[in-house]
Amino acid sequence: MSVTRSAGALGAARPLMRLVTMSGVPILRQLHLEERLLRRTADNWCVINDGTAPPTIVMGVSGRVSELVEIEPVLRDRVPVVRRYSGGGTVIVDQGTVFVTFICNKSAVAGLQPFPRDIMSWSGQLYDKVFDRFGEFHLRENDYAFSHHKFGGNAQSITKNRWVHHTSFLWDYDVKNMDYLKMPKRAPEYRLARNHTDFLCRMKEYMPSRSVFTDGIITALGEQFSVQPTDLETVLSNDEEFVPSTKLLSQQDLEEIVSSKGSSSLGVQEVEA
């Protein structure tokens, strides 16, 4: 009985988490939405986007294109390259990727300090509840992994009063797309210099369906938050003045890197307001 009363008391005090679920939204549009929710609202958000098109390379704010992307094949095949507003590494995403983003006020999680390691620890504990029946789940350095194989890459952005933790989950992936990415110079120790296909795994080999995955996230969130499905149109007013920092790199940007033979002119420093 005491446990029931305690759960009820906690439930009454749970902060609100607005839930937005989408399917197939282009990753550039998703990132613009996230940045707007981060900077123009005061609510906590969970954004889930099931798949994206077309296949797109997404880089962290401080990544150097020449070090991370095979530029000539990307130009040849016209693969979009996006520089997002958050830190973290480089990924290629497509219909096989499931995106989950948490956008929270600093006070949203009791006792959580707004630092990268603390946020990763919190998220790892939350996802442990999602995956505990499906595989040997680990938070390995800054990745989500089944045993020693990565299936989730993370990035974060921390502002004065709020933070973002977003993940690209590999439900499935096209091996050919990995050829557009270079082996990063900085890699987690547990990678052990493995190539992409030896290092990664597919979630579909561990879980029965995408809906089981997303339902698990919502259930786990419900233990800490009052989760409220939200229609964005009822929340966001027109905000034509908002200019996101996430950008699609132009063909000219990429061609200039090729012509300068690896110039680092597109490398930028990560700065948060």
Image: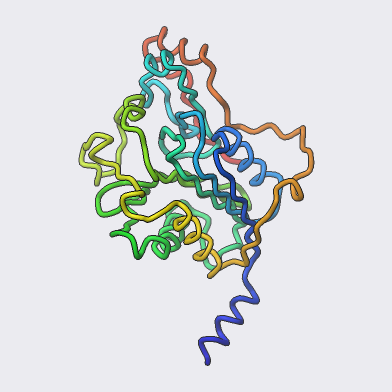
Using the rendered view, name the quadrant where residue 43 is placed: bottom right
Residue drawn 40% across and 11% down? 258
| Residue at the farthest bottom position | 1
Instruction: Describe the colour scheme in one phrase.
Output: rainbow
Residue 54 placement, left or right of 153: right
Q: Is residue 190 left or right of residue 29?
A: left
Q: Position of residue 90 (x, y in %)?
A: 41, 34
Which residue is at a point 41% across and 65% down the rendered structure image?
Answer: 129
* Residue at image coords 29%, 30%: 183
Image height of 11 relative to 16, above or below: below
Residue sitting at 53 percent across and 34 percent down? Answer: 84
- Of 10 and 88, nearer the camera is 10
Q: In the rendering, at what x and y percent does residue 155 appear? A: 46, 44
**Residue toward you, 185 or 154:** 154
As drawn, is 246 to the left or to the right of 205?
Answer: right
Pinpoint residue 58: horizontal percent, then vertical percent.
47, 32
Judge whether 93 appears above or below 65 on screen. Answer: below
- Snapshot quadrant of residue 105: bottom right
- Count numbered badges in the picture: 0
In the picture as drawn, the residue positioned furthest to the front comes out as 208
**Screen quadrant of the C terminus:** top right
Q: Residue 13 location, x and y as percent? A: 64, 74
